[in-house]
Amino acid sequence: MIQPLRILSGLLLSAAIGLLAYRRGSLSGSGMVGAILSGTLFFGLGGWEWGVLLILFFVSSSLLSHYRAGDKAGLAEKFAKGHRRDLGQALANAGVGMALAVARLWWDHPLLFVACAGTMAAVNADTWATEVGVLSRRPPRLVTTWQTAEVGTSGAVSALGLAVALAGAALIGLAGGGMTLATGAGGRAAAAVVVGATVGGFIGALFDSLLGATIQAIYWCEPCGKETERRIHRCGHMTRRLRGLPWLGNDGVNFLSSVVGAAVAALLGWAILGHSL
């Protein structure tokens, strides 16, 4: 059931957070719109537990995007977008959660929150792995061939990146489980969230790397002699596609990995809750 006061509260809170993030350079103008839209749906239709997961992802990921920014500056040309998130990134990261929040209007079921925790764990794990994994002292390896690759290459992982991805997923899982206990839902329900989100989020991040190494569109800048996710390189020149599907960019990959995170979490949640549903 729609509660106008809760939706209004979600709108005001997300607007305040979005404006602050815009002024601090974490969001673009369109990104602020995306933050307000996602925050309103998470808080207004999902509830405070859903909103906390969204905030936890956004705050932790934004802080890590600024962590050792100078050391990561040289890698910016490889990525499709910078640390200032736009509307496309907001929808890619929170779109599945927004859809799940809307679904509560017709089917208010515990598995929806488990799935929400899974999707947010997946995007959190992927973002953490990207922001911290590129700082690894050892070269990453492609998930498909295990050959070494340049730092920042799509589909390449490192031990540091994998460890951080697991930590990012676990943070969302533990937070979701703790809030589930706070609502009085019981230990089994909390375990479903913790296990589902942690495992689902980590698998979602791995799926992101697999897509990045196989079907994500990757381009080549001839003048610079560099690989990039951008159609137009930072130098201003048009790039040519090296591999991947032309319509599948980084935002699309993030969205698909978030779907996998939600699906795995929901399946594990169903297995743990079983007859108690």
Image: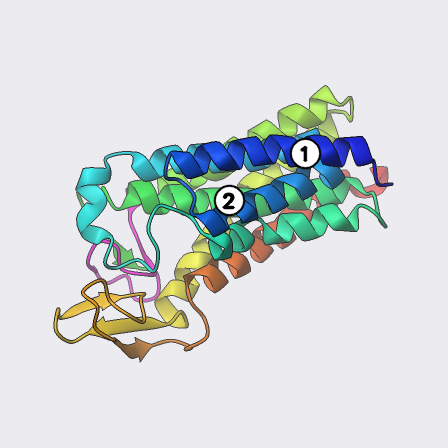
| Residues packed near mark 2 inside 10 Å, few (<14), some (14 to 19) or many (20 plus) | many
Give percent across and percent down for residue 83. Answer: 35, 46
Q: List the residue tagged with mark 1.
A: 10
Magenta-colored span? 143-160
Q: Amino acid at mark 1?
A: Gly
Q: Quadrant of residue 55?
A: top right
User: Does residue 201 appear in this view?
Assistant: no
Nearer to us in this view, 85 or 226:
85
Give percent across and percent down for residue 195. Answer: 60, 37
Horizontal side of 196 relative to 248 (left or right) equals: right
- Main SS, magenta region, reads loop
| 150 in magenta | yes
Q: Amino acid at mark 2?
A: Met
Mark drawn on residue 32: 2
Q: Measuring 66% from the left and 46% from the top, which residue is drawn there?
A: 115
- Quarter of the picture containing the N terminus is top right
Give percent across and percent down for residue 210. Answer: 41, 63
Nearer to us in this view, 139 or 62:
62
Horizontal side of 112 relative to 74 (left or right) equals: right
